[in-house]
Image: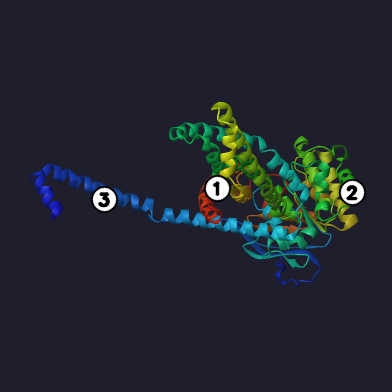
Amino acid sequence: MSEHAATSPSSVPADNGHFIELRGVRKAFGAQEVLRGIDLSLRHGETLCIIGPSGEGKTVLMKHIIGLIQPDSGDVIVGGIRVNGLREREMAPIRRKVSMLFQGAALFDNLTVAENVAFPLWERGLRDRSEIDRRVREALSAVDLTEHSHKYPTNLSGGMRKRTGIARAIIDHSECILYDEPNSGLDPIGSDIIDRMIQRMQRRFGVTSIIVTHDMRSIGKIADRVAMLYRGVLHFLGSPAELERCADPIVQNFIHGRSDTAA
Amino acid sequence: MLAWSRLECVGPLDLSAACRCLGAGMVAWWGFLILMPQIGNPLALPGRVMLHFLVYLGQLAALCRELWTALCSGVWRLRLVAQQIVAIGYGSQGVVIVTGAFTGAVFTFQTYAKFKDFGVETTVGAVVSVALCRELGPVLAGLMVAGRVGAAMAADIGTMKVTEQVDALRVMGVHPVDYLVLPRFLAMMISMPFLVAESISFGLAASYAVSTLGYEMPSAWYVTHMLEHTNMQDLSIGMIKGFVFGIIITLISCHQGLMAENGAVGVGAGTTRAVVISSLVMLIVNFFLSVLLNYIFPIGTA
């Protein structure tokens, strides 16, 4: 474990200004222990990138934050509310604050692009059609999809689906957005559009962002901190500059794409 | 003693046969000892089946509780309910009409010949009418709707589950039962009694056509006997059964959809299970419902 490994935030008082806190989170699926005691905290407006080999539990960790998965032990606190132990119908206050982009975008097949993007507004009770249209146009223009608003998800490319998912995640101006591999399947220009949009969300609205990514170039542009998940624990936690300087061979091999540390 | 005496009756014991029996017995015993650890506790299998059944009932009960909460919330998403009524009610009419019509026709065709032997062929209308209202109409319409609508429900929701669309709903603060199950439930409640009524109506029309056109029975006899022996209670039983079958199909199919996992294979398996379980449960519940409803609305009181 590197010298930048995460310190235990369980000693941190609850009102320390952290928007998200994970304390000793453990999760196993059958005999496979995916998370083995994760301690992590994020301030308001901070952008954290989570990296690590595939299948190491990055998405699982993210789903804990929004209550899609409950931890076996440990605490997940979002906006001062303990998420674990809440019933599905009690999650509404958390989910008004946090939105998420899924790895496969998870668009509703029976709705058009515009209807998919408008869905969170409609479900939260907004009925002013002109206001909905204005915000949908704004969100779609942020991801460069205005011309495709009438199409159904099955008629979109993988990258366009991903960008529609991002438009849906940002439209409600949530306090926190979780992005599960936002750059995967995008060309370099599309990827840059997404990076700029994430930065803009942070600067204009102070949005807290957690991004699971394998795109090392994006990390340098958007991340305040980087966490590396390896074998169920946070192997590294620090700034992108510290990540570059980190001497740990596992970290170095991962960020430079060398495969000789599989063991 | 009795067994031994019987053996003695057979004749003196053949020693070589006795040795073969002993050898076979030892082989069986050793086989049992070797296989026993593989088989494990003989009660394990029935226990596991019972456990799975109890878990299944528990999941259905939890779904019912969530559905009740959704129903009481008053947020019914009437646009989705209307869409589902079109898909379920309007879309199933063809299937239900053909099923009802040909059931009525074949039932009349078969009973007429036998009734003629007894000289009571004019009562065919009465028998077919009561049978269609009380049993054949609701059961066959229910089975057809289970195949058409139940499968679609399980496949739609199952696909949404495995492609994370259900999780996306949850992330946006929308409970999947509120959005996916409640509109289908309400649409089925509204559609099923009408579909059953449609099935019965077309069954009777076909029966009338076979009797009067095929067997040249006077129309007045058919209609008179039918109206004499069929009343609102018979029709009510059909409607009530349709309503209950609608609940069964929706609960079982939506549950299979929400529990789907393992991609397309899981969705396919869930869809199959939805149709099979709905159909079987409907047939079993139909018996007990018939007993209960016959107690409330006794047959032959018209």
Mark 1 crowdedness (10 Å alpha carbons): few <14, some 14-19, many ≥20: many
- Which callout, 3 or 2, points to the residue nearer the camera? 2
User: Residue drawn at (12%, 42%), measured in percent from left and top?
Assistant: B16
Foreground residue among B280 and B4: B280
Residue shown at 57% from the left, 36% from the top: B222
Asked if one can make out residue A104 in the rendered structure from this viewpoint, the answer is: no
Instruction: Tell which subunit mark 3 falls on.
Output: B
Mark in front: 1 vs 2: 1
Which mark identifies residue A129?
2
On the picture, is B202 further left or further right than B10? right
Q: Secondary structure at mark 1?
A: helix
- CB atoms of marks 1 and 3 within 8 Å: no
Question: What is the C-alpha distance between the residues marked 1 and 2?
Answer: 44 Å
Q: Is residue B124 left or right of residue B79?
A: left
Q: Are marks 1 and 2 in contact (CB under 8 Å)?
A: no
The spot of residue B282 in percent (x, y) is 55, 47
What is the C-alpha distance between the residues marked 1 and 3? 46 Å
- Per the rendering, the mark at residue B282 is 1
Quarter of the view holding residue A116: top right
Asked if marks 1 and 2 fall on the same chain, the answer is no
Give the residue type at disc 1.
Answer: Met
Q: Are marks 1 and 3 on the same chain?
A: yes
